[in-house]
Image (cartoon, grey):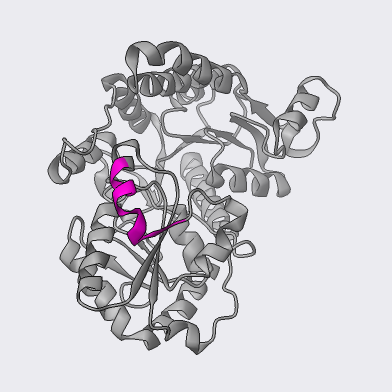
Amino acid sequence: MKVTLIGRPSHELTYLAKQLYKDNHLQKVITFRYLDVNNFHETLKILLKLKKNNGINKLTKAVLSIYVLNTVLIKSLFPILGNKSIEFASSTCEKYFSIKASNNLPLNSDIYHGWINYSLKSFKKVSKRNSNGVKILEMYSVYPKFGIEIYEKYLDKNQFVLPSFEESKIKTLDEEFKITNAIIVPSEFVKKSLPPNVNNVYLIPFGIDCTKFFPTNKNKDFYNRDELTVLFIGYIGYRKGFHLLYDAIERLKENGKKIKLRVAGSVEKSYSSRLKEIANNIEYLGRIPHNELNDIYNSAHFLALPSYIEGSPLVSYEALAAGLPVLITEDMQPIVEDGKNGFFIKMNDVNDIVDKISWIYENRNWLIEASKMARESALKNTWEIRYSKLIDLYEKLLNERKG
């Protein structure tokens, strides 16, 4: 079985590519950068042929020019278009990458696994030139129109600037749906965002590297501390529901509960002034390097993500691997079991967040058991296990194609 991957250099693409390479299934990966190179200087050595392009990098078409194009477009257009220049640059780069990917596509692969917004031209080429090739689309986020409906329903337009989606971008996504043989989604939330005429959808959760994220030794005293530490990691602002979490915790503190809100991540522009106002009421850590996050997870009692829009946030998988129960909006995390290794919370419902955190505060023994179950659930959902599920899907689809 020969597999070609097409898309952004995400965690899910990188882990999948390396496992396919290890098992001699990878024919080519077309993405933005070399997957086994960690910095600009190493990339430059490969380009100048000062370093051999070995291993997985030899099978990689790295469209490095996309970084230059993105930077040039934003810098040149920002004085004219403002923040819209970022959206324009993103859309242009997606189209550019789609063309480059199609031009570098092998036509004898068995499986073509592409990521949304990057795969249409490649999939069309496969349909014309390789009728036996199976096309699989990775839908890592919600359908844009569904997202806009949620924003318009719940968020104040005076506080939150609604993202704009070009109709051409939605049209591209709709065409990808029509031409693909299967669509992979990471959560029920993404699945229910899809238009009703979209079929052949498979829910396969993201994975976790349980060697990088793991629980440190915590004794009973940690869980029974007077002060409960709630962790939020992500883009700080309205889209992630941070304001809901903050308001819920402030309400609990007013009722005499000792709770610390520990926060890490970048700040949404529309929320920056508000964050300054509440800075004394939270512990803001700024952006934390990925290789330092395990210590941050282990410093808290649980992670809370009351988001409005998510595909299936990787931080929630990492937290579970570190033995941290997760509070998350319903349907966004397929490996959370409500009441066992975390809790689901209703969208845009501060009262529900208050009730769940208050219950955890009063039931510390639950935290001990939930932390064990969090780790156990993570061990059943590693990147390797996700890879096995994908291989099973590849083989199923190939068998169906053969008849």
In this picture, residue 147 sits left or right of residue 158: right
| Front-lying residue, 92 or 201 | 92
- Magenta: main secondary structure equals helix
Q: Which percent across, then down, holds residue 120?
A: 43, 24
| Front-lying residue, 12 or 276 | 276
Q: Which percent across, then down, holds residue 275?
A: 33, 48
Q: Residue furthest left?
A: 153
| Front-lying residue, 157 or 367 | 157
Rendered residue at 30%/41% (across/down): 273
Question: Which stretch appears magenta?
Answer: 273-284
Rendered residue at 68%/31% (across/down): 60
How many labels, in total? Answer: 0
Quadrant in which residue 255 is drawn = bottom left
* Magenta span includes 69: no
Rendered residue at 49%/50% (across/down): 393
Q: Which percent across, then down, holds residue 263?
A: 42, 57
Instruction: For residue 195, say whether it is visible.
Output: no
* Magenta span includes 275: yes
Q: Relative to 152, say whether 248 is above or below.
A: below
| Front-lying residue, 21 or 273 | 273
Quadrant (top left/top right/bottom left/bottom right) for the N terminus:
top right
Instruction: For residue 224, say whether it is visible.
Output: yes
Q: Relative to 401, say whether 77 is above or below.
A: above
Q: Which percent across, then down, holds residue 216?
A: 59, 75
Quadrant in which residue 148 is drawn = top left
